[in-house]
Amino acid sequence: MTEKLRVALLFGGVSSEHEISCVSASAWVRALDTTKYDVTLIGITKAGRWLRFAGTPEEMADGRWEQHPGNLPCVISPDRQDHGLLLREGDKTTLVPIDAAVPVLHGKNGEDGTVQGLLALADIPCVGCGLLGSAVCMDKAVANTLMDANGIPHCHWCYTIRAEAECQREALLKRVEGRLDYPIFVKPANAGSSVGITKAHDREQLNAAIDKALAEDDKVVFEEFIRGQEVECAAIGNPDDPATVWTTRPGEILAGDEFYTYDDKYKNGVSKTVIPARLPDAKLDEVKAMAYRVYYALGCSGLSRCDFFVEDGTGRVLCNEVNTMPGFTAISMYPKLMESAGLDFTALTDRLITLAVTMRKGAY
C-alpha cells in the first residue's frame, strides 16, 4: 500500500478576507482524497495565532473552529532539518513531518509571499505561486509595471505612496486628474478581492477614496474606467515544465452591483456565473492566450486566476489583475472554470498538490 502524502492545509489568516479563506479551505477539505493524503489543518486567527485544528469542515466554514477544545498551538518550523510542524501541548513539543503545504489564504499575510517565504525556508513544497510571484501579483503597482514591461495591454494607471497622499494631497489630486478621466477606480495596491476599492466620479469622491484605500495599504493605485465585459480565466501549471501549463477559456460574472464587489463575490449571492463568457469564439481564444502570456510575465506557478476587460466597441482585451490564490467557495469562478475544462474539484486538488511536489527547486 502506498504511503499517504502528509499535507498541511493553512486557513484563516490575518487578513480582511479571513472568513472567505475559512470557507475556501473547508471546500478543499471536503474535496481532498483521504486515501492519498493525510491532512493536518492549521487555522490562523485574525490575531495571528496558529492552531492545529482537528474538527469538521462545517466548523471551519462558519468560524466555530477557533473555539474547538482540541486546538493546539503550532508553528511551521523554518529549520529544514525539521521539515514540518512543531505542535505544542503543555510542556511537550512534538514534530509533525509535512510533505507539502496548501496555503488556502487570501489577501495579506498569506497570498502576498509571506507564508510562501516561510515554506521556502522550511523546504516544504507549497501549492500555488512562490514568494516572488505571490508578491508581484498582490501589489497592483508592481504587477502593472511588469505588464507594461512585457507589453501586456491593460488600462491607463498611476499610483502614489502614503507620504505623497498625506503631505501633498492637492498636487496628487491634480496629477491624477491630469492623467485619468473620471470615473477613476481607486484601489489599495495590496489588499485583494475588491477590499477598499472606490469608483470615484469627481474630486470629492476621489479625495475620500484615497483615504479609504490608505486604510488598507500604504500605496494607492488609480486606474481608468473601462466600459466592457469583465471575464476571468483559470491558469494552472509550473513554468519550469511548460507541458503542464495551460489556461481555460474565460468565464464571466454578472455582477449585482456597479462593479464586482467583495460582498458580490462572497456574501450576497446576487452575482451569476456564465461559462464560457458571452463572447465570440475567436475572442474567447484571444483572452485565453492572453492569460497564458500574463501567467508567464508575472512569474506565476501552480495556479492563478487572470482577470480581464473586453472593451465595448473596440473589443480590446485588457488585463485587470491576477489572483494567485482565488476563492474556492461554492460560487467561485476558478474551480468552476476548471470543472468546465474537465477537472472536478477532487481531481483539481490532486493536480495542484502534484504540481507543488514536482516543482523544480529554485524555480520561481
Image: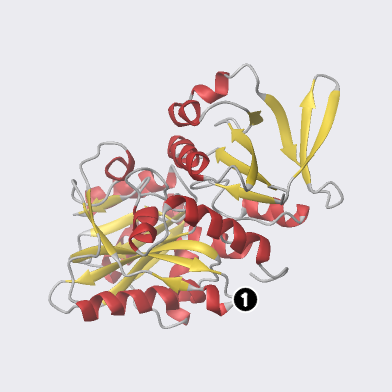
Write the residue at 54% across / 52% down: 111
Please tell me which residue lies in front, 138 or 12: 12
Relative placement, left or right, of 265 versus 242 is left
Q: Residue 203: where, in percent of width, then height?
A: 23, 54
Colour approach in the figure: secondary structure
Q: Residue 248: where, in percent of width, then height?
A: 37, 69
Quadrant showing the C terminus: bottom right
Could you say whether the residue bearing mark 1 is in a helix, strand or loop?
A: loop
Instruction: Categorize mark 1 by other alpha carbons within 10 Å: few (<14), some (14-19), many (20+).
Output: some
Residue, disc 1: 240
Relative placement, left or right, of 351 versus 228 is right
**Farthest left residue?**
313
- Residue 169 visible from this viewpoint: no
Kind of residue indicated by mark 1: Asp
- Residue 267 visible from this viewpoint: yes
Q: Is residue 79 above or below residue 279?
A: above
Q: Residue 50: where, in percent of width, then height?
A: 66, 33
Q: How many marks?
A: 1
Write the residue at 44% across / 60% down: 160
Q: Is residue 364 above or below residue 138?
A: below
**Farthest top residue?**
69
Please tell me which residue lies in front, 220 or 269: 269
Q: Quadrant of residue 331?
A: top left
